[in-house]
Image: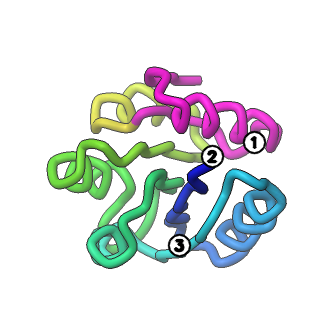
Amino acid sequence: MNRLRILIVDDQRRARQSLRALLATEERIGEIEEACSGLEALERVEAFHPDVILMDARMPEMDGLEATRRIKSLRPGIRIILLSMYAEYGPEAVAAGADAFLAKGEAPGRLLEILWRLADGNGATSR
C-alpha cells in the first residue's frame, strides 16, 4: 500500500496541529508536512511532492484560492481539499481548481471520507 504524503496549509498553528493529530492516526497516511501560507505551500510542493493538500482558504500573503490555482497549473495531479469556516467559499474553491471543499466545522470523519475518495481516484466534491 502506498501511503499518502499530505501537506497541511493553514496560517493558524492550532488548526495545523489538529489536522496533523487526526491524520497521524490513519494507516494510509505517510509523511505529513506543514506550511503557514500560500506562498510557503508553493515552495513545499516543489520540495515535498505531496499527494494531497489540505488548504485553508483565507491566509495572509497569498490566500488558499490563489495558491490552489497556481499549484493546479504546475501540478494538476495533486489533490487539493480547500477548507474554510465560511461555506460561501465552496463555489470559489471548485472554480479555483480544488478537488473538494469542506467547511471547518464539519465532523472529522467527513474530512477523512473526502480524503479517501480523492486518494482512490474518485471525482471532485463540494459541500
Residue 114, placed above or below residue 82: above
Label 3 sits on what residue type?
Asp
- Is 79 or 64 nearer to us in this picture? 79
Q: CA distance from mark 3 to mark 1?
A: 17 Å
Label 2 sits on what residue type?
Met
- Locate residue 74, reporting x and y percent: 16, 54
- Locate residue 106, reporting x and y percent: 76, 37
Magenta span has 119? yes
Give the image quarter of residue 97: top left
Quick one: label 3 or label 1, which is nearer the N terminus?
3
Q: Which residue is rendered at x = 50% and y = 43% of the image?
A: 81
Give the mark count. Answer: 3
Quick one: label 2 or label 3, which is nearer the N terminus?
3
Q: Which residue is rendered at x = 38% and y = 38% of the image?
A: 98
SS type, badge 3:
loop
User: Which residue position is annotated with label 1?
Assistant: 105
Furthest residue toward front: 1
Q: Tell me: 9 left or right of 3.
A: left
Magenta span has 44? no
Residue 86, placed above or below residue 95: below
SS type, badge 2:
loop
Disc number for residue 11: 3
User: Which residue position is annotated with label 2?
Assistant: 85
Quick one: label 1 or label 2, which is nearer the N terminus?
2
Q: Tell me: 84 left or right of 55.
A: right
Residue 39, placed above or below residue 127: below
Whether label 1 touches label 2, CB < 8 Å:
yes
* Range of magenta residues: 99-127
Q: Quadrant of the C terminus?
A: top right
Q: CA distance from mark 2 to mark 3?
A: 13 Å
- Locate residue 22, reporting x and y percent: 79, 58
